[in-house]
Image (cartoon, rainbow, N blue to C red):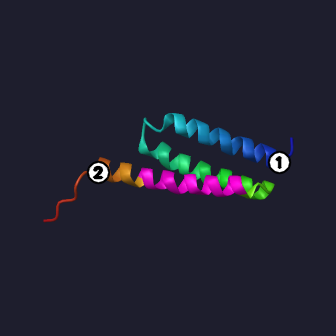
Amino acid sequence: MDWLTAFGAVAVTAMLVCYVLEDRAPVFVLAFAGACAVSSAYGFLQGAWPFGVVELVWAGVAMRRWRRRTERAAGPIIAD
């Protein structure tokens, strides 16, 4: 197994683990976004640019989900 294949395997495994744990805490949604970004890099490095683009989109979707989830958990901001 070369380094690129190992890199991709770790990235996709991290995505799977973070996805499974998303309901436990918002940090796992953020970690999922990071793993998607790393998987995107793997796709571009491997030469599979459609995979890289899709994973980059998923990273953006996950970042939006994380932002919404953390804002909802913080509650409304009340000005004095």
Residue in the picture at 67% in, 45% down: 11
Q: Secondary structure at mark 2?
A: helix
* Distance (Cα) linking label 2 and label 1: 41 Å
Which quadrant is home to the N terminus? top right
Q: Are marks 2 and 1 in contact (CB under 8 Å)?
A: no
Question: What's the residue type where badge 2 is placed?
Answer: Ala
Residue in the foreground of this view, choosing between 60 and 4: 60
Residue 76 spot, x, y in % from top left: 22, 55
Which quadrant is home to the C terminus? bottom left
Nearest to N terminus: mark 2 or mark 1: 1
Q: Which residues are magenta?
A: 50-66
Magenta stretch: dominant secondary structure: helix
Q: Is residue 53 above or below residue 29?
A: below
| Left or right: where 3 falls relative to 12 | right
Residue 66 spot, x, y in % from top left: 43, 51
Within the image, what quadrant is residue 9 found in?
top right
Q: Is 5 in the magenta? A: no
Residue in the picture at 61% in, 48% down: 35
To which residue does mark 2 refer?
74
**Disc assigned to residue 3:** 1
Q: Is 61 in the magenta? A: yes
